[in-house]
Image (cartoon, helix red, strand yellow):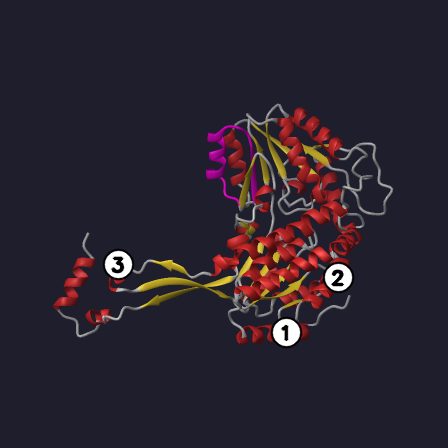
């Protein structure tokens, strides 16, 4: 796979910007055609893309790739295709009183921004390129995509397929390592989307600031699961472990720790072990449904996190004991980390793997205070049947999104915005919110035929002062 040069990326950007000037407002039919091309690309080449993702991970469930990378992308593209005509309509607004009485009009026009850069990560390499692309294309933009160098096979295949389906001045993929990513971040896009680690996002934001490029940052953080006293522990464990083992926990929205009522640790551990055994009866490290850690560096990092927690007094509960991998892939058994301390590495950094710390609390105020004392997470998950407690969680904590009585599901709703807040991100996409994110909302005011400004022009007199007096009354 040949890396792009700074000069070649700049040349592509200039061609796309020139094409945008020639065609500043693509019709609904043109936008739908571009969305259809992506849908056809994904459906026609789904097997090849899933094989490429399996090769990149060493082992990855083909079903997971088909459902979450290909299927999730197609869902987003089809949703945009279905609704974009309505999204494109100018939005009527109310002119300032009394201008509307004289025939003035106000509206918002949704104008394509131009060229949008997309930096996509390795954990869902297809979906996190094509899901934002759905909003980018629906809004009438062109796009340049920089996929991860960690998924070399998938990135190379996407570059090849997109070049077959699109002209370079519509969509282009550039590949390469960190130096290409850094140069890509510094290009003068009309908007830039980055999905990845908060630490990298700081560099992306600095680079984008040189050209005042607006950003959508989809990051991560430590998303908590709050287990209420009214929650069904079996349900909590099954649904939490479903997400924590999906893609081996390499998900920005994966539960990063559990806040559990005191005295329920053993029940949760038993239920979590049962859940894993039910989902992976042959053992996770032997199952075709389980995914490997992406590479040796991340595998070693996760092992070090577990060892650091063990050395500092935490109890590690292996949820798949007795199974050892015969594969060369970096398959890692899921494990609970009971009684973690805040000075442990696993409680300071986003885990991005199948390790799950479990902390206890005595009352809900304590749980809320613990969350609020830390950087704002990408998601908060609450389990329980206490609606007052649920409302307190939603009101008194701040997160990018939330799911009640499950995890992850809010991202699967195309009609809900997906995004973070503060250290977990800025901006959002999905559905209409993605269309808005990648559109310039241009304010348009149409003046009346009457010369309403005459009273505001000098020389000012009694009529002007009377008008001001009526406006400035208590």
The CA distance from mark 3 to mark 2 is 57 Å
Dot 3, how many residues are within 10 Å of its Cα: few (below 14), some (14-19), or many (20+)? few
Q: Position of residue 397 (x, y in %)?
A: 49, 40
Task: State the residue at coordinates (16%, 60%).
Answer: 469
The CA distance from mark 1 to mark 2 is 22 Å
Q: Looking at the image, which is closer to me, 82 or 172?
A: 82
Task: State the residue at coordinates (77%, 38%).
Answer: 333
The CA distance from mark 3 to mark 1 is 48 Å
Q: Point out the tag, 1 or 2, that comes first from the N-terminus.
A: 1
Q: Give the magenta part as a residue range.
A: 379-399
Is 290 left or right of 214, judged from the image as shown?
A: right
Task: State the residue at coordinates (69%, 65%).
Answer: 162
**Viewer-side label of 3, 1:** 3
The residue at which mark 1 appears reads as 10
The answer to whether residue 467 is magenta is no
Task: State the residue at coordinates (34%, 66%).
Answer: 445
Q: Point out the tag, 3 or 2, that comes first from the N-terminus.
A: 3
Is 199 left or right of 159, judged from the image as shown?
A: left
427 relative to 189, above or below: above
**Viewer-side label of 1, 2:** 2
Q: Position of residue 71 (x, y in %)?
A: 67, 50
Q: Are marks 3 and 2 in contact (CB under 8 Å)?
A: no
Q: Quadrant of the N terminus?
A: bottom right
Q: Position of residue 299 (x, y in %)?
A: 76, 46
The residue at which mark 2 appears reads as 157
What element does badge 3 sit on? loop
The residue at which mark 3 appears reads as 97
Q: Looking at the image, which is closer to me, 341 or 364?
A: 364
Whether residue 460 is visible to the viewer of this picture, yes or no, is yes
Dot 2, how many residues are within 10 Å of its Cα: few (below 14), some (14-19), or many (20+)? some
């Amino acid at each position: 796979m040949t890396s792009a040069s700074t000069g070649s990326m700049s040349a592509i950007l200039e061609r796309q910007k020139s094409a945008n000037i020639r065609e500043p407002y693509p019709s609904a039919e043109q936008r739908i055609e571009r969305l259809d091309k992506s849908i056809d690309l994904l459906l026609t080449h789904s097997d090849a893309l899933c094989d490429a993702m399996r090769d990149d991970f060493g082992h990855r469930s083909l079903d997971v790739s088909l459902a979450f990378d290909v299927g999730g992308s197609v869902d987003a593209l089809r949703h945009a295709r279905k609704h974009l005509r309505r999204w494109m309509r100018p939005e009527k607004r109310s002119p300032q009183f009394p201008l509307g009485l004289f025939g003035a009009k106000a509206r918002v026009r949704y104008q394509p921004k131009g060229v949008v850069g997309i930096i996509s990560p390795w954990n869902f390499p297809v979906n996190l390129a094509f899901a934002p692309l759905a909003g980018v294309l629906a809004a009438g933009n062109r796009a340049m995509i920089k996929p991860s160098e960690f998924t070399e096979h998938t990135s190379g295949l996407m570059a090849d397929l997109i070049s077959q389906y699109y002209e370079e001045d519509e969509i282009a993929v550039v590949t390469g390592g960190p130096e290409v990513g850094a140069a890509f971040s510094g290009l003068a896009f009309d908007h830039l989307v980055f999905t990845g680690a908060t630490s990298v996002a700081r560099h992306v934001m600095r680079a984008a600031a040189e050209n005042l490029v607006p950003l959508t940052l989809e990051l991560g953080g430590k998303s908590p699961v709050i287990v209420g006293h009214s929650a069904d522990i079996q349900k909590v464990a099954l649904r939490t472990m479903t997400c924590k083992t999906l893609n081996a926990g390499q998900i920005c929205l994966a539960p990063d720790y559990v806040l559990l009522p005191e005295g329920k640790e053993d029940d949760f551990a038993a239920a979590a072990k049962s859940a894993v055994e039910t989902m992976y009866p042959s053992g996770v490290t032997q199952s075709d449904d389980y995914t490997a850690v992406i590479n040796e560096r991340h595998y070693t990092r996760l092992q070090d996190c577990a060892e650091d927690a063990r050395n500092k007094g935490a109890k590690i509960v292996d949820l798949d004991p007795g199974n050892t991998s015969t594969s060369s892939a970096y398959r890692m058994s899921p494990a609970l980390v009971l009684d973690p301390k805040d000075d442990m590495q696993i409680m300071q950094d986003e885990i991005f793997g199948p390790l799950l710390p479990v902390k206890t609390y005595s009352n809900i105020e304590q749980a809320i205070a613990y969350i609020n004392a830390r950087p704002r997470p990408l998601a908060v998950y609450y389990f329980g049947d206490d609606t007052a407690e649920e409302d307190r969680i939603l009101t008194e904590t701040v997160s990018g999104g939330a799911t009640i009585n499950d995890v992850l599901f809010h991202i699967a709703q195309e009609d809900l915005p997906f995004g973070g807040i503060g250290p977990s991100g800025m901006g959002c996409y999905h559905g209409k919110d993605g269309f808005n994110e990648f559109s310039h909302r241009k304010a348009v005011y149409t003046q009346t035929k009457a010369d309403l400004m005459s009273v505001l022009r000098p020389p000012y007199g009694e009529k002007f002062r009377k008008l001001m007096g009526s406006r400035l009354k208590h």
